[in-house]
Structure formats: structure tokens, C-alpha cells
Image (cartoon, grey):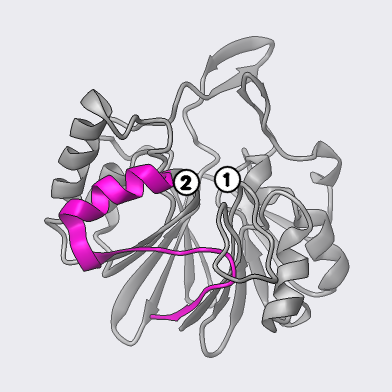
Amino acid sequence: MKITVLAENTSCADDCGCEHGLSLFVDADSSRILFDTGQTDLFAENARKLGAALDEVDMAVLSHGHYDHGGGISRFLELNEKAKVYLSRYAFGDYYSEKYIGLDKRLSDSGRLVYIGDDELNVGGVRLIPWGTAECAHPSFSGGLSKVEEGVTMPDDFRHEQYMLMEHNGRRVLFSGCSHKGILNIMERFRPDVMIGGFHFMKLSADGEGREQLLHCARLLGEYPTEYYTCHCTGTEQYSVLSSVMGDRLHYISTGMTFDI
């Protein structure tokens, strides 16, 4: 399985731009998958430079309903005439972080979108799994994000978040866009061999009490025999704190990077 990072907050390639967002091109032998589309059309520009053929993508997956993961949906639908986009039926909700951070609602009735309810969907061996009613044993650090339902503002419960689970060479590989339900909860539930995605620690201070929380999380993550590839909403300073405990079991992935699982 080869993974190419099309968009992320940082870049390791001089000719590839970066932005606050995430998009991954997954070449999994028999299928090609686009996991998230970043904030803008940048993922498509970088894909061209990196030789990732978006017109050959078999399916696209949207991890959750935030603009920095689904802002490029329209561009993808223009470039690829066949692939469907799989997303939560709650993805087009009214989501806020001081300002609106949801998706472009004009796309919600596109015939290429496949909405997933509260149950797991298996698409050719690719498992798309919503959180559903699973309990959370650990706190999450999602930074006060909210949603509006029937005119009432309330904390976001992230029911629009889903995870992609694949098996490759006997290893279980889990993709999570932002891990809003809490990376510790996600690890306890899925226990993958490889974990790829953001941990949403960026709003935790890398000093003081925040640093202690990060160190505590790093120790718990280190108890799993998992290889981690993180990015985006984890935060670079926060990553440095985590890596001081987790060592070479934790990797940071940037725009322009290609790596094999």
C-alpha cells in the first residue's frame, strides 16, 4: 500500500503548496482511494505534480463534515467521472468554530455522493465505520467546536465522523481525518496495526498542563503495538512532545511525501 500526501499543513516538497487541511491518495493494489480533499483545489494541483492520477480513483472517502477535509469535493467530481464519494449522512450539518466550518451545502444533492448512516459499510473490502453509539472511555481535545440544530447551538458530538479500515499484508490499517472522538478512544476501539491521521491536539498547549496531557496520551498510545503516522490537527509542537515519548513509532507526514505500509 502506497500513500501520497496531497495536502497537509506543511510541505516537504518545494513545488507542492500546503494548507490547513488533509488529503491522502491511497494506492492499495487493487484499488485507488482518495481520503479527504483538503480545504481547496490545492490537493488536485499537488496530485498532478506528484503523479497521483485522480481520474483513476475508484472511490473517495470523506472523514467528516469540515471544510478543511471536504473543500475540494467539487474539484474532484470534475476531475473524476466515475468514483463515488462516501460520507456520513450528517456531513452537511451546521458546524462552527466561531465561524462556519462546514461543507458547501450546494453539493449535498450530487448524485455521486453516497451517504452512510449509523452502521458500518463495506465497499469492496474497505470498511467505513461511523462512531455510532460506542462509548468513550477517555476525554477528547476538540477545542469547543459546536453545531447548530433547529436554531440551537450545542457542542458538536461528531456523529459526522467516520473511519476507514483496510487490511493489507495481514495488517489492519486505520485512517482517521481528525480523530475528534478522541485518539485514545479510537485506539481502544479499533486497535489497528497502523494508524494514519490527525490526533486533534493542536489546541493543547505544548507547555504546562497541556504538555502533561500530551505526555500522558503519548504513554497510553505507546502501549499499543501500533505504528503511527500523524499530521494536520495534531500540531507540530504537540508532535514534538509526543515523539519525545513515542520515538520512532510516531511519524509526521507532510504534503509531497509518499510512504509505503
- Label 2 is placed on what type of residue? Cys
| Image spot of residue 31 (x, y percent) | 58, 83
The foreground one among 70 and 110 is 70
Residue marked by disc 2: 178
The foreground one among 153 and 119 is 153
Q: Is residue 201 magenta?
A: no
Sequence-wise first label, 2 or 1: 1
User: Looking at the picture, does residue 190 appear above or below residue 134?
Assistant: below
The foreground one among 239 and 145 is 239
User: Looking at the picture, does residue 152 appear above or below residue 138?
Assistant: above
Magenta stretch: give its range: 234-261
**Residue furthest top in the image:** 152
Q: Residue at x 34, y 43 (%)?
A: 238
Mark 2 and mark 1: Cα distance apart in space = 8 Å
| Image spot of residue 231 (x, y percent) | 45, 55
Circle number at residue 64: 1
Mark 1 is surrounded, within 10 Å at the Cα level, by few (under 14), some (14 to 19) or many (20 or more) other residues, namely many
| Image spot of residue 152 (x, y percent) | 62, 9
In which image quadrant can residue 23 be found?
bottom right
Judged left or right of residue 130, residue 38 is right
Judged left or right of residue 4, residue 75 is right
